[in-house]
Image (cartoon, grey):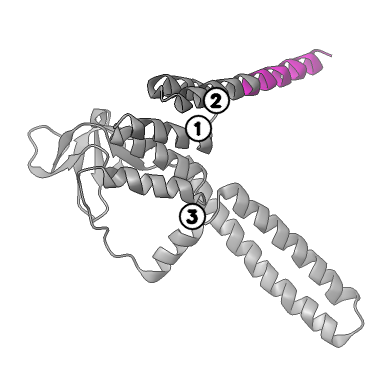
Amino acid sequence: MKKFAICLMLMFSAVVSAFDADSLKVAADSAFAKEDYKSAVKLYRTALEGGESAVICYNLGCCYYRLDDMARSVLWFERAVLLDPSDEDIRFNLEMARSKTIDRITPRHEMFFTAAWHSMTSWLSADEWAFWGVGFFALTLALLLVYFFSSAVVVRKIGFFGALVCLLFVVLTNALAASQRELQLYRTGAIIMHPAITVKSTPSKSGTDLFILHEGTRVDILDNSMKEWVEVQIADGKKGWMERRQMEEI
């Protein structure tokens, strides 16, 4: 009886939290429509305390864009892309915000198969890829039933080879779902939040100056083990060390 009561309390808390988040989003949407972007930011960020949402992250990116804070605009659009990589509006607005930043970095060339895999991964979210995986698995079972129970040779061949093809798609979609889930769970990207920073050769202010980055530029974290310094890499492959306080992780 006690466990049942605890379950009811947890369910009630979850419903209340969801209701509060929806109410906050409605209020934030209203503030955004009235061009009160600072109030909208506060409300959206409070709503996020109930859980991550691609829509709210996207709306925050739009708010900061209107406030001419491109670093935070890029940050929140990047977070929205992680949660919903298939949304073209998010990607378009991310590129718009990036175009307002200073640094112009040419990405290094990727191998064809690596680039193709990254492109495929971004087509859908992890949950969507997993949904397709379940669908292909069900189709595989159906085709196997056709193979085992049909008396017509042609139909049996269709069932057998169709099941093989669907099984390949099960493996592919699950691998893509796992890859997308890994991107969400083990986030290595960060955005420069200071107007300008100098990347060093060593994790020390006395290290050799390597290059300068400006706010809104994305870096990928290579070494996150130190308290005050992180090793980062930019899109063209250059590496170096910067202070942790100068960036915010995606």
The answer to whether the residue labelled 2 contacts the one labelled 3, judged by CB atoms less than 8 Å apart, is no
Front position among marks 1 and 3: 1
What is the span of residues highlighted in magenta in the rendered image? 1-18
Distance in Å between CA atoms under marks 2 and 3: 27 Å
Residue 236 got which mark? none
Q: Secondary structure at mark 3?
A: loop
User: Badge 1 is on which residue?
Assistant: 56
The answer to whether the residue labelled 1 contacts the one labelled 2, judged by CB atoms less than 8 Å apart, is yes
Q: Which percent across, then down, holds residue 41?
A: 42, 24
User: Badge 3 is on which residue?
Assistant: 122
Look at the image and tell me in which quarter the N terminus lies.
top right
User: Badge 2 is on which residue?
Assistant: 25
Residue 102 sits above or below residue 108 on the image = above
Q: Secondary structure at mark 1?
A: helix
Front position among marks 2 and 3: 2
Q: Which percent across, then down, holds residue 75?
A: 36, 37
Residue 150 sits above or below residue 194 on the image = below
The answer to whether the residue labelled 1 contacts the one labelled 3, judged by CB atoms less than 8 Å apart, is no
The amino acid pointed to by label 1 is Ile
Q: Which percent across, then down, holds residue 182?
A: 49, 47
Q: Which of the two discs, 2 and 3, labels the residue nearer the N terminus?
A: 2
